[in-house]
Image (cartoon, rainbow, N blue to C red):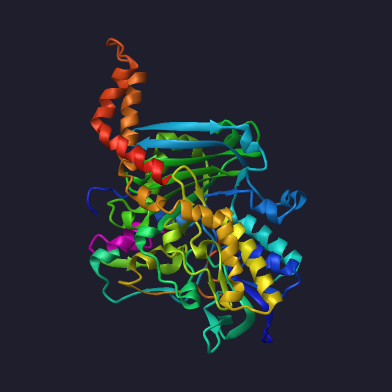
């Protein structure tokens, strides 16, 4: 193989990048991580919650115990929000307190920790440098990166530079995805005392917390939803909505966010909290349909820059795919380097590993999901109001003769149309 | 903008963020951008950096940018002429994320 500055260069230090670098470093390869933020995590943002299962394959329990995770999520809430009411499903289970758990997370501290682990394993880091281009040889194989005047070469380049990657187009011929396949996320973080958060969310320990997704009025009836995650001493509240849907909506996303905060179902959760950050990020909800080529000559793509994300409706996943894909990219690069073949063929074991894993299996089996959710209009405007009307019939007592439950429910369901509901249930069963 | 009353002051929210100012614009729009395309950006930008004044004048200031790329996706083929990352060490610096 050619003499290069490094065995591998990783672009971007989010969830995928440092883990790819760590795998390479553990195998004794020289690896450089180039991150555009002044510190790892300083350009990154999540809702958010991370599922722990892939991290347990990278780190032992003692190491993982030092990770700056926020709260273990032991309560899941799904809220149907009408403008003047809300109906919430609230689920908690001891199964959430096993190794198959999840934690709320803030990417500033968490990504810094991941970067520290990669550095301790022997990866080199440069922060504060945006990579402008990949460098290719005459045959079109990727052989390095360019930042400003500097060129640094490597046998393998792993792109983990996020959903807004400016490099995948040049590196693997990716075409920018359409606005209908990407959502925009907006989040505000509110500082609150740990005990206040625990009390408001009905958890008995400051190490435990709540995840909530909100359908309906959070996005003013448009495709998308609200979210709320409790961190140790802050609450993350926000909205994710289809870019195309918002671009045609009367409501700017910022106004949706403003009105979400004052909804009675939400206001009480953040009351007295101090706004400490306002952030934004795209969410590649198109999944399989908008993925770039994951392997090229001398190059691999992992994590959000590979659009590895699924919105399940009741949960959103991306970071666990990124962690797993980062690990596989690192392992594949090691294997290709050892075999002396870093062409697309030599690196194709990355694709094979992904296909064998939950990452591509999920992305393939839920490929109908984005299309279904995008057209699930009644979930965003219709069902929340129907549920409100049913509940009003049952719980608001005006002194007139009481109704049987069926007389509270059926008239409202009939207004929505039995066939519409049947169609939605069938659609949901197929796609979700 | 139709019946929706805009009550939010996003600039006040952005004021709590940490930024390292960049003297070069990392997002550049075409001259005299199309009204309908600009209105899309007004709606989707999570930092509300695209504004239409009372007199109809369009205003855009990149300095509060959250670097999400939404404007690049929605108008990358129309009125967003250039979208690059801010220069080394510049732009938003999330402390929470």
Instruction: Between residue B46 and residue B69, name the one nearer to us.
Output: B69
Figure label count: 0
Q: Residue at x 28, y 23 (%)?
A: A410
Residue A252: x and y, percent? 33, 53
Against A302, is A245 above or below?
above
Q: Which portion, as a residue range, is magenta?
A: B39-56
Among the 4 quarters of the image, the one containing residue A205:
top right
Q: Residue at x 71, y 62 (%)?
A: A116
Among the 4 quarters of the image, the one containing residue B74:
bottom left
Instruction: Between residue A255 and residue A101, name the one nearer to us.
Output: A101
Residue A168: x and y, percent? 49, 72
**Quarter in which the N terminus of chain A is drawn:** bottom right
Compared across the picture, whether A349 is left or right of B7 comes to right
Residue A346: x and y, percent? 61, 75
Against A37, is A288 above or below?
above
Instruction: Between residue A213 and residue A158, name the one nearer to us.
Output: A158
Residue A42: x and y, percent? 58, 62
Against A23, is A257 above or below?
above
Compared across the picture, whether A161 is left or right of A288 comes to right
Compared across the picture, whether A191 is left or right of B50 comes to right
| Residue A127 within the magenta-colored segment of the rendering | no
**Quarter in which the C terminus of chain A is drawn:** top left
Q: Is residue B97 visible?
A: no
Compared across the picture, whether A13 is left or right of B24 comes to right
Q: Is residue A197 visible?
A: yes
| Residue B46 within the magenta-colored segment of the rendering | yes
């Amino acid at each position: 193989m050619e003499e290069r500055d490094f065995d591998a260069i990783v672009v971007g230090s989010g969830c995928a990048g440092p883990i790819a670098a760590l795998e390479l470093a553990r195998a004794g390869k020289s690896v450089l991580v180039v991150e555009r933020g002044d510190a790892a995590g300083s350009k990154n943002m999540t809702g958010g919650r991370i599922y722990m299962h892939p991290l347990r394959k990278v780190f032992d329990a003692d190491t993982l115990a030092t990770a700056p995770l926020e709260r273990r999520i032991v309560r899941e809430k799904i809220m149907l929000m009408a403008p003047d009411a809300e109906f919430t499903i609230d689920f908690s289970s001891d199964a959430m307190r096993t190794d198959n758990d999840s934690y709320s997370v803030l990417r500033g501290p968490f990504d810094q920790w991941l970067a520290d682990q990669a550095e301790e394993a022997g990866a080199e880091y440069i922060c504060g440098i945006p990579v402008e281009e990949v460098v290719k040889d005459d045959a079109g194989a990727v052989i390095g990166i360019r930042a400003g005047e500097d060129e640094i070469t490597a046998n393998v380049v792993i792109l983990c530079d996020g959903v807004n990657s400016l490099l995948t187009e040049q590196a693997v011929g990716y075409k920018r995805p359409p606005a209908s396949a990407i959502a925009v996320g907006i989040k505000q973080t509110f500082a609150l005392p740990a005990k206040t958060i625990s009390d408001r969310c009905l958890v008995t320990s400051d190490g435990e917390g709540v995840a909530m997704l909100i359908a309906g009025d959070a996005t003013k009836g448009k495709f998308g939803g609200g979210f709320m995650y409790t961190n140790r001493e802050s609450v993350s509240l926000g909205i994710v909505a289809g870019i195309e849907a918002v671009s045609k909506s009367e409501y700017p996303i910022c106004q949706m966010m403003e009105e979400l905060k004052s909804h009675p179902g939400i206001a009480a959760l953040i009351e007295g909290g101090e706004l400490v950050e306002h952030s934004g990020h795209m969410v590649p909800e198109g999944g399989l349909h908008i993925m770039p080529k994951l392997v090229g000559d001398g190059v691999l793509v992992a994590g959000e820059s590979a659009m590895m994300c699924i919105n399940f409706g009741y949960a959103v996943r991306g970071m666990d795919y990124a962690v797993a894909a980062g690990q596989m990219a690192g392992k594949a690069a090691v294997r290709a380097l050892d075999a002396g073949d870093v062409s697309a063929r030599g690196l194709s074991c990355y694709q094979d590993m992904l296909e064998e894993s939950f990452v591509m299996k999920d992305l393939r089996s839920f490929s109908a999901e984005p299309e279904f959710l995008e057209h699930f209009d009644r979930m965003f405007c219709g069902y929340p109001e129907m549920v409100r009307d049913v509940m009003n019939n049952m719980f608001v007592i005006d002194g007139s003769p009481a109704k049987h439950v069926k007389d509270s429910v059926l008239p409202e369901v009939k207004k929505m149309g039995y066939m519409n509901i049947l169609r939605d249930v069938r659609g949901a069963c197929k796609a979700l | 903008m139709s019946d929706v009353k805009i009550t939010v002051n996003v600039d006040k929210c952005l004021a709590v963020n940490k930024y390292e100012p960049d003297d070069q614009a990392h997002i550049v729009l075409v001259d005299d951008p199309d009204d309908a395309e600009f209105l899309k950006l007004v709606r989707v930008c999570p930092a509300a950096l695209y504004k239409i004044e009372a007199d109809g004048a369009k205003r855009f200031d990149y300095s509060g940018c959250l670097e999400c790329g939404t404007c690049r996706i929605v108008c990358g083929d129309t009125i967003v002429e250039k979208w690059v990352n801010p220069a080394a060490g510049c732009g938003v610096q999330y402390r929470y994320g």
